Image (cartoon, rainbow, N blue to C red):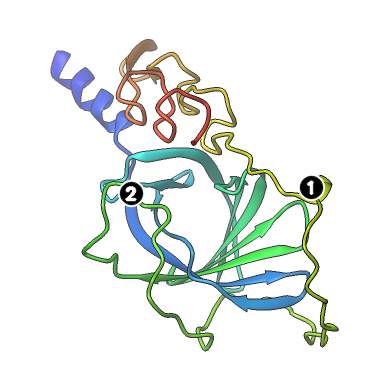
Amino acid sequence: MKGVFVACFLFLCIPLAAQTYYYERVKIVRNGQVSVDAGDGHYITFNDNGCYDSNKQGMSSGTGFRNYKSFENGIYKYFGKSYFGGDAYYFFSQDRGRLNIKMQEGDVVYVYERKTAPSVMGPSVRGYRSPSSSDNVGAVPVVVPATPVMPATPNVAPSASSRVYVDHTCRGCHGSGYCTCCHGTGKIRITNSIPEYHVTYVDCKSCRGTGKCQVCYGKGRID
């Protein structure tokens, strides 16, 4: 009986058919205007329930979970918190080779392509910028109107009142400093119904039981 319980417990804790891929941004479509951009490269791990940003080993980076919604016309659809701070739709091509992140608020689409992760990448999977990129990269179809020719804007020095200040709030925990998977408890609740109902708690894999956000290490901000 003990052996059966252990087997069932492990079955519930380990995601089934989890797969991790590396994606690199190639374009941004903002208000109908397309710009080439390679300012982000990161891993995404898929399990039976959805997908999330992670490291190479599939450990969550604490930037939110996107729930699986549907598969229609060769496109997988997910929805949930994004790295960019708000809710977003994640559209993957059938082979998961291409990704469009469509923000729920505003007319912004981030276009990614699955690639081989660079060998020089360190522990942080964010902030990698490739030395060059091509605008001729296929992506999940996005309806983009013709780009209008914008009039030239004269170079005017910004006044003191118009200066832009950087928000250092951590996007991983939105300033709380807590792990978003276990909400700062350091524990994850596991419910086992086979052979009988039983609840137990295990260390959160995302924060390794510390309860702290692994992006800012509990500070709530990125300096």
Between 31 and 95, the one lying in front of the other is: 31
Q: Residue furthest right?
A: 151
Q: Residues within 10 Å of mark 2 (few under 14, many from 20)?
A: some
Residue 195, above or below 39: above
SS for dot 1: helix
Residue 199: quarter of image: top left
**Callout 1 crowding tier (Cα within 10 Å): few <14, some 14–19, many ≥20:** few
- Residue 59 falls left or right of residue 154: left
Does residue 38 show up?
A: yes
Q: Earlier in the sequence, mark 2 or mark 1?
A: 2
**Can residue 141 be seen in this snapshot?**
no
Label ID, residue 18? 2
Q: Position of residue 109 (x, y in %)?
A: 66, 65
Q: Under tag 2, what secondary structure?
A: loop
**Which residue: 77% across, 51% down?**
105
Instruction: For marks 2 and 1, give the one nearer the viewer.
Output: 1
Where is residue 190 shown, x and y percent of the image? 38, 19
Q: Which mark is residue 141?
A: none
Q: Residue at x 36, y 61 (%)?
A: 22
Image spot of residue 107 (x, y percent): 77, 63
Residue position for label 1: 160
> Which image quadrant for residue 195?
top left
Q: Quadrant of residue 156?
A: bottom right
At a point 35% along the width and 60% down the height, the residue shown is: 21
Inspect the image, locate mark 2, and give the three-letter code of the amino acid beneath it: Ala
- Badge count: 2
Between the residue at mark 2 and the residue at mark 1, the CA separation in whole angstroms equals 51 Å
